[in-house]
């Protein structure tokens, strides 16, 4: 039994007429009659009683009708679901992200993507930069929100945000109430910092700027996570130089002060494997592109 036979059967049963069913199905009447007879032979019992005014389902036909309708609805639903997945409007997408993206970049991107593609299941995983790059290469995640640098030969990337660095200062520090802090004023001060060799390269850029300003602070502790650095700063261990998005942490006893003389920025990007042709990923990239452009326009107009 083929689905088309069930479709023919349902049409004839609902129309109570082979000619009207043929018109509804846009086929000729003789082939339709032949297909109904073939279905009856295959089943081994009649589905219709022929009358002078048309056809009516037999008891077997009446019993078959609701099940045939359900099968056709299921088949149509399966085809529609497959088509939606092919377009990227259904299915799933796995997205890695760094801790620092959770405060602004990730929520913004997820909100806009889900608004456009509500039937896609997005699985998010917090991962370090190195973990994301490995997972991308092995196909365990479809895209990652991370910091540059990106291997452009293997991965494609899109800049999502660029933010300045600020000083995270204990609230009781005299510098906490200043409009800004000059890098040279950090000379001899205790700092908590990212470690050297961190994939984002923050420590190297910050150290170079401090050196150029003639400041030689004392690095008293290192940490890789943004919230850890801010927590240490709030606890009075030392000043932390962190991306501005850290303001979203709203840690008690901590103030964020702009820095004079530090022109480096913290960049966040979306990265994906160039060979990944998943439609859901293509849609995510399109949303990310429009989101980053909208953010850039907002910054320009501010």
Image (cartoon, rainbow, N blue to C red):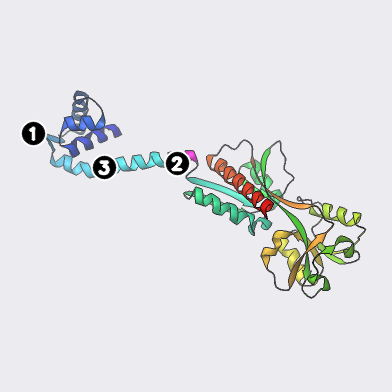
The answer to whether residue 140 of the structure is visible from this angle is no
Residue displayed at 67% across by 39% down: 155
Provide the secondary structure element on which disc 2 rests.
Answer: helix
In the rendered image, which quarter contains the N terminus? top left
Q: Is 279 or 221 nearer to us in this picture? A: 279
Provide the secondary structure element on which disc 3 rests.
Answer: helix
The answer to whether residue 43 of the structure is visible from this angle is yes
Seen in the picture, residue 174 relative to 298 is either above or below; the reply is below
Q: Which residue is mark 1?
A: 53
Give the magenta part as a residue range: 82-87
Q: Which residue is mark 2?
A: 84
Q: Residues within 10 Å of mark 1 (few under 14, many from 20)?
A: few
Q: Where does residue 154 sit, x and y in percent of width and height? A: 69, 37
Q: Which residue occupies the extreme front position in the image?
A: 301
Q: Earlier in the sequence, mark 3 or mark 1?
A: 1
Find residue 177 and report its image quarter.
bottom right
In the rendered image, which quarter contains the C terminus? bottom right
Q: Which residue is mark 3?
A: 69
Q: Where does residue 205 sit, x and y in percent of width and height? A: 83, 52
Q: Where does residue 148 sit, x and y in percent of width and height? A: 73, 47
Q: CA distance from mark 2 to mark 3?
A: 22 Å
């Amino acid at each position: 039994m083929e689905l088309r036979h069930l479709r023919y059967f349902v049409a004839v049963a609902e129309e109570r007429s082979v000619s009207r069913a043929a018109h509804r199905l846009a086929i000729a009447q003789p082939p339709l009659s032949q297909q109904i007879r073939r279905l009856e032979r295959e089943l081994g019992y009649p589905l219709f009683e022929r009358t002078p005014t048309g056809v009516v389902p037999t008891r077997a036909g009446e019993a078959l009708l609701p099940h045939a309708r359900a099968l056709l609805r299921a088949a149509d639903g399966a085809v529609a679901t497959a088509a939606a997945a092919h377009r990227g409007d259904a299915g799933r997408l796995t997205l890695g992200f760094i801790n620092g993206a959770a405060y602004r970049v990730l929520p913004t991107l997820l909100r806009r993507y889900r608004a456009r593609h509500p039937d896609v299941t997005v699985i998010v995983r917090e991962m370090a930069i190195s973990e994301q790059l490995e997972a991308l290469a092995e196909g365990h995640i479809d895209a990652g929100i991370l910091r540059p640098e990106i291997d452009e030969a293997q991965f494609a990337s899109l800049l999502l945000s660029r933010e300045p660095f600020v000083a995270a200062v204990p609230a009781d520090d005299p510098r906490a109430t200043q409009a800004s802090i000059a890098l040279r004023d950090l000379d001899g001060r205790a700092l908590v910092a990212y470690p050297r060799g961190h994939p984002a390269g923050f420590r190297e850029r910050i150290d170079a700027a401090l050196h150029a300003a003639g400041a030689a602070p004392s690095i008293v502790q290192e940490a890789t996570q943004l919230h850890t650095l801010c927590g240490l700063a709030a606890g009075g261990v030392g000043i932390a130089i962190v991306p501005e998005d850290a303001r979203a942490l709203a840690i008690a006893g901590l103030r964020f002060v702009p820095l004079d003389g530090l022109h480096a920025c913290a960049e966040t990007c979306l990265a994906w494997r160039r060979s990944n042709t998943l439609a859901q990923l293509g849609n995510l990239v399109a949303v990310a592109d429009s989101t980053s452009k909208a953010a850039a326009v907002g910054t320009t107009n501010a």
